[in-house]
Image: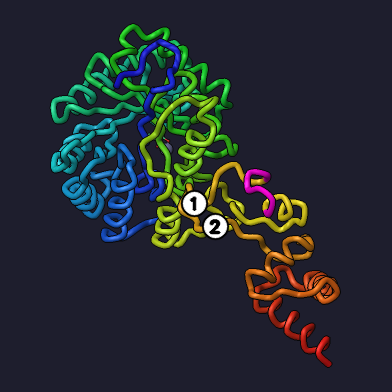
């Protein structure tokens, strides 16, 4: 598959590139053991992720070994390792991914004036030479080379176009343009990809890729905008873990593509039913809790408390849900009993608990339930059972 200048079509496939084990693991406190990484990688591979960025082989012996072992074990996914634009990094990365059926070297260099001046202390021309040398080196080691322009979104477009052209000329098969500091807006990000695909003469020889950080909470929106600009690979992480405010969340981009096919006509091959399992696994191995209201995988994502919503849900599930819980691997919607719950949900709850009350008893039980709900944040099944048993006892006196 190559990205090209024609408008996106309904059959365009989007490569899902998961970087939970690399960018995700880079966030403070999220480090994983060797065994945990193998477990996460096995699940990503099984659920249909196209590319797994397994780590940064030069970073440590442990990272090298986990990338190499994941590369040996992967059945379907391409296994990528990260390498700075340094010959030693690239050689080490090549050694780690060569065990894979499909191995990728992902090499990157900064391109923005702020990084060139303060971090790299190199001129634009020197960086172009570095791109040529390192991409050529990587391409001599593997067929599949990804090149990233770090801080692409703060790079002047004419210079970025020269860098992209050079990387493709030297053999890069994927061009990733990251929003490294989470600064771009969707419109800017879309335009950056459009411009590259129009300006760079050899643009149709590579797949363009998005990689968005969430500093302004725009990582998923920017990733989707990048697709509209012609990108066909999304880099993301499970639960959106990653540097600072994190990366675009895999479960969110995959479900946006699945639910809004009408306006986002791109296909991913990820099995959406595995998303909750993946979220729980990553949360367990990193000890990073998933916020309750997190889209798709938060514990409230399919929970309803308000009376109006519960009433609607009891009549038809599409009234307040845009996807089924089963589609992301959750058994069922939950109607949480609290002070906002209405009589319809209360009656339904009693039914599932095995109680059939007459109208008067139901009214009494409901008003006692409301009193209790005013005092407690959540009313559990046991509370309701106790309350109804009391009601039944009183009515038998
Ligand atoms: O955010 C970023 O720029 C990165 C690169 C290494 C791809 O993670
Ligand atoms: Zn990143």
Looking at the image, can residue 331 be seen? Answer: yes
Q: Residues within 10 Å of mark 1 (few under 14, many from 20)?
A: some
Residue 372 spot, x, y in % from top left: 79, 74
Rendering colour mode: rainbow
Magenta span includes 315? yes
Q: Write down the region rendered in magenta.
A: 314-319
Q: In which quarter of the image is residue 12?
A: top left
Q: Residue at x 45, y 42 (%)?
A: 250
Type of secondary structure dominating the magenta stretch = helix
Front residue of 119/391: it is 391
Q: Name the residue under label 1.
A: 326
Q: Which mark is residue 285?
A: none
Q: Is residue 369 above or below residue 34?
A: below
Q: Name the residue under label 2.
A: 332
Q: Is residue 128 above or below residue 312?
A: above
Mark 2, secondary structure of its residue: loop
Q: Is mark 1 within 8 Å of ligand 2?
A: no
Mark 1, secondary structure of its residue: helix
The image quadrant where one finds ligand 2 is top left
| Tag 2 and tag 1, C-beta contact below 8 Å | yes
Q: Residue at x 30, y 42 (%)?
A: 52
Magenta span includes 84? no
Q: Which residue is drawn at 77% across and 84% down?
A: 392
Quadrant into which the N terminus falls: top left
């Amino acid at each position: 598959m190559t990205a090209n200048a024609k408008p996106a079509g309904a059959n365009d496939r989007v490569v899902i590139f998961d970087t939970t084990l690399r960018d995700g693991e880079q966030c403070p406190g999220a480090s994983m053991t060797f065994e945990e990484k193998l477990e996460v990688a096995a699940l990503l591979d099984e659920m249909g992720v196209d590319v797994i960025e397994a780590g940064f082989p030069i970073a440590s012996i442990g990272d090298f070994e986990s990338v190499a072992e994941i590369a040996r074990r992967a059945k379907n996914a391409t296994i990528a390792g990260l390498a700075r634009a340094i010959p030693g990094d690239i050689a080490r990365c090549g050694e780690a991914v060569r065990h894979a059926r499909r191995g990728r070297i992902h090499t990157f260099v900064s391109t923005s004036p702020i990084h060139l001046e303060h971090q790299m202390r190199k001129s634009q021309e020197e960086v172009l030479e570095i791109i040529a040398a390192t991409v050529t080196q990587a391409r001599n080691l593997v067929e599949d080379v990804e090149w990233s322009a770090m801080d692409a979104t703060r790079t002047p477009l004419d210079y970025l176009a020269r860098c992209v052209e050079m990387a493709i000329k030297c053999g890069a098969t994927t061009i990733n343009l990251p929003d490294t500091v989470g600064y771009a807006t969707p419109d800017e990000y879309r335009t950056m990809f459009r411009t590259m695909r129009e300006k760079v003469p050899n643009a149709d020889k590579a797949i363009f890729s998005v990689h968005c950080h969430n500093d302004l909470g725009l990582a998923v929106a920017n990733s989707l905008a990048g697709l509209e600009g012609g990108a066909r690979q999304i880099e993301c992480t499970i639960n959106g873990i990653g540097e600072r405010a994190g990366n675009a969340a895999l479960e969110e981009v995959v479900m946006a593509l699945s639910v809004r096919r009408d306006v986002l006509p791109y296909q991913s091959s990820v099995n959406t039913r595995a998303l909750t399992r993946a979220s729980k696994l990553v949360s367990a191995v990193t000890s990073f809790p998933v916020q309750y209201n997190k889209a798709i995988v938060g514990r409230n994502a399919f929970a309803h408390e308000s009376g109006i919503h519960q009433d609607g849900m009891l009549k038809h599930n599409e009234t307040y849900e845009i996807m089924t819980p089963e589609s992301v691997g959750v058994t069922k919607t939950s109607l949480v009993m609290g002070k906002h719950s209405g009589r319809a949900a209360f009656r339904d709850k009693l039914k599932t608990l095995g109680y059939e009350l007459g109208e008067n008893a139901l009214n009494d039980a409901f008003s006692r339930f409301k009193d209790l709900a005013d005092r407690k944040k959540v009313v559990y099944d046991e509370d309701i059972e106790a309350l109804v048993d009391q009601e039944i006892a009183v009515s038998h006196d």
